Image (cartoon, rainbow, N blue to C red):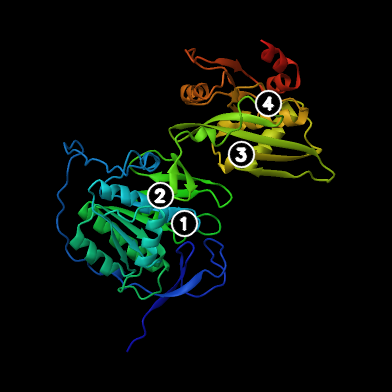
Amino acid sequence: MARAKTHFVCQACGALSHRWAGRCESCGEWNTITEEAAEQPVSGARGARLPKGRKLKLASLDGDETPPPRLCSDIEELDRVAGGGLVPGSAILVGGDPGIGKSTLMLQALARMAAQGRRCVYVSGEEAIAQIRLRAQRLGLEKAPLLLAAETNVSDIIASLQDEKPDVVVIDSIQTLWSPVIDSAPGTVSQLRAGTESLIRFAKKSGAVMLFIGHVTKEGQIAGPRVVEHMVDAVLYFEGGNSHHYRILRAVKNRFGPTGEIGVFEMAGSGLIEVENPSLLFMGDAEERTPGAAVFAGMEGARPLLVEVQALAAPSALGTPRRAVVGWDSARLAMVLAVLETCAGVRIGGHDIYLNIAGGLRVREPAADLAAAAALVSSLTGNPLPARTAVFGEIALSGVIRPVAQLDQRIKEARKLGFETIITAAPAQQGQYHAHIRPIAHVADLAALIAGGACDAQRST
């Protein structure tokens, strides 16, 4: 009998090779290449004629079909990140560190939707049914009318779901699935691709919402090939850690809503609790004036969020001062430091610089440049910013402060939390902002405002 053909696949990126190697040439990872059975060649290879296909019925763009209503999970933070609810027939991948709360959130969401009369199924490949029941008892959900299964065979799962006709299905986790038609171990690239494709095809045909739970690597990426993330309709990441009592659910891909949207949860003994006002978690007391602290009015998706930026400049005894940053881009910090020293005359070279975003949140938008610069100058001079003051703006390499988008939402959120003064670039259009805007045109003006007596003058008025 002829020997089955095999090839070598990188389990990190999915690249194929004809021989084993210790290091993948595509992604550079070590010891990730494994031998797997090669897929059967399709008809038409090497110039053979393909079988005649059926003619497709083409449709016009101006159809009058109404989209099905979204399924609300009764968890507002989850519905917000999903774009206003779960779309029937969609496939959503939820990733996060071990123990961060992925399974807890999915179990809570299923229990609430089951209480609404939805038919919900929770399929676990990592836990026994008794273990799931123990977790449900701890969360107070033991009376929820949802269905449980402990299985990893994709064919058996789909056959069971076809009989149950569920509205929402949770697969925990996608790395444990295996298909009997693929001759490779569970968790490999071939098994991940085949299992995900089969379950997504079932979701599209049946209209059920398919929620996949995925493991992440030590770099914070969902384990397995990137093709899995391309196959699903939405990818949600759980951020946070054991040292923080809250969790952030962030949408990095969403075909049915905005990306970058976040939902904030607090981890408690009874499970994950929604946080109604996340800004209070990420900033200190508005009345407290501490050198090296600035409140940044940022945007996370469509949600305005106030975050405290903390900076510490300490004299360095090293030849090369240290630069440490948590929650912000280190390259962005290096740029702001260079602009402050070159364009504003702030001497930073002999100091160790530490920058931290309070609460462990990661800020990605350039509008945080001005808040970081204000915190740095405040720490260097020892002069705090005025009380009840929020800062935001983008810094150009010339030192000019550039205006940012969504000015109204940022100011409204700041005013709602008691901030009266806004330090930012001059607005392009005059409007009723109901706040005192202190326009800053250049980083030199910011340095003079904090280092000089302007802060005291403004505070006295």
Q: Are marks 4 and 3 in contact (CB under 8 Å)?
A: no
Whole-percent x and y of residue 171?
35, 59
1 vs 3, front mark: 3
Amino acid found under the numbered disc labelled 4 = Arg
Q: Which residue is mark 1?
A: 222
* Label 4, residues with CA under 10 Å away: few <14, some 14-19, many ≥20: some
Mark-to-mark CA distance, 2 and 4: 40 Å
Mark-to-mark CA distance, 1 and 4: 41 Å
Q: Which mark is residue 235?
A: 2
Q: Which residue is mark 3?
A: 357
Q: Residue furthest bottom?
A: 1
The residue drawn where x is 36% and y is 81% is: 4
Sequence order check: which comes first, mark 4 or mark 3? 4
Sequence order check: which comes first, mark 1 or mark 2? 1
* Label 1, residues with CA under 10 Å away: few <14, some 14-19, many ≥20: many
Amino acid found under the numbered disc labelled 3 = Ile
Whole-percent x and y of residue 201?
26, 58
Whole-percent x and y of residue 15?
46, 64
2 vs 4, front mark: 4
The residue drawn where x is 38% and y is 79% is: 5
* Label 3, residues with CA under 10 Å away: few <14, some 14-19, many ≥20: many
Q: Which mark is residue 289?
A: 4
